[in-house]
Structures are given as C-alpha cells and as structure tokens.
Amino acid sequence: MAIDMNVFRGFAEQIKMLPQMAQPTDCPDGERVSRAKAVFREKLDRSKATYLESCVHCGLCAEACQFYIQTEDPKLTPIHKLDLLTRFYRREMAPMRFVYRLFEPDITAEDLEETQHLVYDSCTECGRCGVACPMGIDIASMVNVTRQGLAEAGLIPAGLRAVEQEQGSRGTVFGVGPEQLRGAVEALRAKGLDVPIDKDKADILVLSSTIDILLFKDVFEATVKVMNHLGVDWTIHSCAFEGANFGMLSGYEEVQRSASERITSQAIQLGAKVVIVPECGHAYPALRWEGANEHGEPLPFEVMAISEFLGREVAEGRLHLEPIGRKKHVTYHDPCKVGRHGGVFKEPRAVLDALDLRRTEMPKNRLNNFCCGGGAGLFVMEGATEMRNAAFDLKRMQVEETGAESIVTACGSCRVNLMAGADRTQWPMPVESLVELVGSHLKKPAD
Ligand code: SF4
Ligand code: SF4
C-alpha cells in the first residue's frame, strides 16, 4: 500500500529535530585525542595494518565512490578518508615509526574534528571502493574503525548521537520500545491476525525495526502474514525486537554490544534456530558478524535477512505466491550491507521472479550497485544532506535507465532515503518493500 506522504514528511521533520535532543559530550582536547588513539591502537590488528601498508595509489577507489563521482572533490577519495588512521599507524605502530615521526605530525583535536565530515557525512560504508581496489583494501571497515575512535572521543555527529544515546540509555529507538511494539501487535490482532509475541520457546525469532513500527506499518503486517502463511514456529519478543543498531552506526562499541547481546541472549533463551533480520540493511552485519564478535563465539543460531529467508522459502517450494503479471515493471535496489557485504543477491530476485513481474537491472547492480546515499546512519545526519542528495541523483539516473515504474528494495533506510530524494526532486517513482509485495500476494491455501 502506498504510504501517506504527509506521514512520511512528518517523520522526516522529526529526524531534523534530532540534533536538539543530543546530550553534549564535553571533553578536553587532550583527552579526546588520547581516547581516539587508544581505540585506534586496540583496533589496528595485523590485517588492518596490512591494509594501511598496501595502497599503491592507483585511484580506482575514487572512481567507485558515489560521493567522489558526484563532486569530484579529491578530499572525498576513499583512501583519503583513512588519512588520520594512517598517520596514527605510521607514527605509533609501523615498523618504521621512528622515521615517520620525523615528518608525520602528531594527531590533534582539530584533526579529529576535520575527520568527522569524511567518515560520517561522506561515507556510507557501502564497500564499493573495496570491491574496486586491486589490493583488496577494505576501506569501509577502516572508516568504521575511525568512527569508533571519534565516538570514544565524543565526536559523533549530533543527530546520530541523539539516537545512539537513546538506544544506549533506554533501549528504545525514536521512542519505540516494548509498549509501542505491543500497540502495533494489538492493531494487527484487531485486524484478525495472529501475532505470537513473547513466547517462551520458538524455532524462529523475528526482529523488526522502529521504521516498520512507526512508518512502514504495512511491512510489519506483511512480515506477520508471511510467517503465519508458512506455518512455522515463530515469535517476536518485546524485549529484543529492534534490529537497528545505532551503536554500530555511530562507532560507539558499548551500545553496539548491548544492542546485539540483547538479541543474542533472547534467541538463546528461546532455543531459536534462526533469527530473521527485518528490512534494515545494517541490522544484518550488526548481528551476523559484529554480533558474533561481541558474543565471543559462533552464534548458536542462523542469522538471515528477511529477503534471504523469503528467497530460500521460494526456492524450497514452501512459499507460494500469486503472480502479479508482466505489466508491473520494477528494478531491484540491493541494500549494500545485505548485498555487497552479505552476498544476498539471488534470493530477492528469486522472490520477484516468483511474483512473475517484469524486472530490469540497473546498469550498476549487485556487487557494483550504487548505495542509496543514506546508509551507515547518513539518513539521520544533519551534515550529510548535500552528500545524500548527490548520491540520490546518481541513483535516480541508474533507475531511469531501466525504464522501470517502481523500485523495490529490502531496507527501510534505503526506502526512506530514496523516497526523500524522490519527494525533493518531485520524481513520481514508488519505492516498495519486497516483504510487503510478498505479504500482499500470498497464495491462498485452497489454490
Ligand atoms: S565505503 Fe562507499 S561511500 Fe565510503 S568511501 Fe567507499 S565507496 Fe565511498
Ligand atoms: S583502489 Fe586501493 S590501492 Fe588504489 S588508491 Fe584506492 S585504496 Fe589505494
């Protein structure tokens, strides 16, 4: 169902208010520098140090980055975003550090502040540069290390900091917690849907996200319909339903750990075999890899993005869909964290093909897909507006080349960013949810 644009614009206005809600993180300059350095020292293990030693300055990463492509600003060259980290490494950890110290200046608080714009506002950690790099340098992961250092130094941009502080202190995101989830469940029960919330044991723990409870309510409803349609033993838990992890996005590890451990321990208590991550791109790596790192041992359950789960159910013949027909022409936007980082490409396409609609790929797709521009928390960063808009303009050109009449994706943040761009540029292009399409085309059992 099409979303009411007034509701959407109200949500976008709320996001603009976030900086006013952030608590200050005052800290003397020297303390900021030593905190950031301590994080860099801890995080720069041998493989990351190798990354910092390997660049051959070929420039290929620049041609891969949406922000460089759109602005041609050399400061936005991906490898340049690691300058602070590289300088730290050379002065403090490199084998030749005694030589480097002769000409590499020490890090200052001003350097940290200048780096904020590069690693927060101008990088979605999309990973496209890492795919292009002939040396295999994973720039996105190093950007995240820099974010971790800045976060510890109290330099998270205010909008992102407000949400990270809320999730860290109250466990809610945009004011959505157990009470709001129960309200959403009651609303679905009033429509006659069975929603098995807070079971003691279940094979599958389904997560949701604030965006689906507040804004894309039809996605939550569709998720419930799909799980019931499959007849699996599932639950959603009011103490552990939020897939979004603003600790990971901001770089603040304490919040990242507590958000992922909340889910991990609930899943273990339930005896869950699978945890399904909702349409939220970063929630997938936050639990699947980072969550396992934080847990300290392999997770005793499988983590699946919902698009991945749906694709598997289609492939194994359990999910039967009503065909939509070739008159509907769509293109699929891969959320970076699920696609490029997670390798989930064929599953959402298998679902779309099972719906028998017409599907055309963008010129850059799958591993080479361009980010929506709002990933890694950019959609709540006030300083990232120009970059978000630039990335959207590039994405719009990609979509227009397909001739499609609708974009389908499997990430709420991608949807928000694409819808905001479409609204800003008065582009009448629907941005749809994969799960919602499935939920509204489930084949009835009698068929
Ligand atoms: S991760 Fe993406 S946004 Fe960040 S520097 Fe690389 S290509 Fe650019
Ligand atoms: S593509 Fe890799 S090797 Fe080339 S400049 Fe970028 S980081 Fe360095």
Image (cartoon, rainbow, N blue to C red):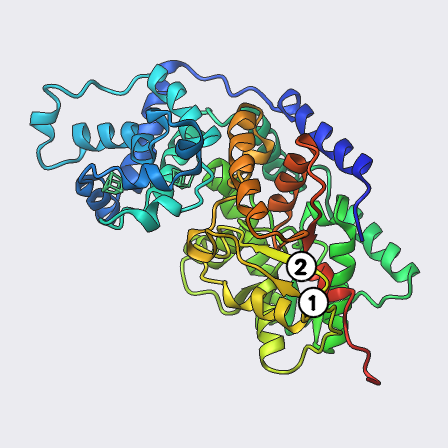
Q: Position of residue 420 (x, y in %)?
A: 66, 35
Which quadrant holds the C terminus?
Answer: bottom right
Q: CA distance from mark 1 to mark 2?
A: 7 Å
Mark 2 residue type: His
SS at badge 1: loop
Where residue 270 sits: x, y (%)? 63, 68
Q: Position of residue 300 (x, y in %)?
A: 49, 69
Q: Amino acid at mark 1?
A: Arg
Q: Residue furthest bottom?
A: 446
**Mark 1, other Cα within 10 Å: few <14 / some 14–19 / many ≥20:** few
Disc 1 + disc 2, Cβ < 8 Å: yes
SS assignment at label 2: strand
Q: Residue at x 62, y 76 (%)?
A: 313
Identify the residue at image location x=50%, y=63%: 345
From the viewer's perspective, is residue 30 above or below residue 365?
above
Tag 2 residue: 329
Query: How many labels were placed on the picture?
Result: 2
Does mark 1 have its CB less than 8 Å from ligand 1? no
User: Is residue 331 or residue 260 the one in the foreground?
Assistant: 331
Disc assigned to residue 326: 1
Q: Quadrant of ligand 1?
A: top left
Q: Nearer the viewer, residue 281 or 33?
A: 281
Look at the image and tell me whether residue 352 can be seen: yes
Left or right placement of residue 63 versus residue 152 in this view? left
Relative vertical location of residue 295 with respect to residue 381 in this rendering, above or below: below
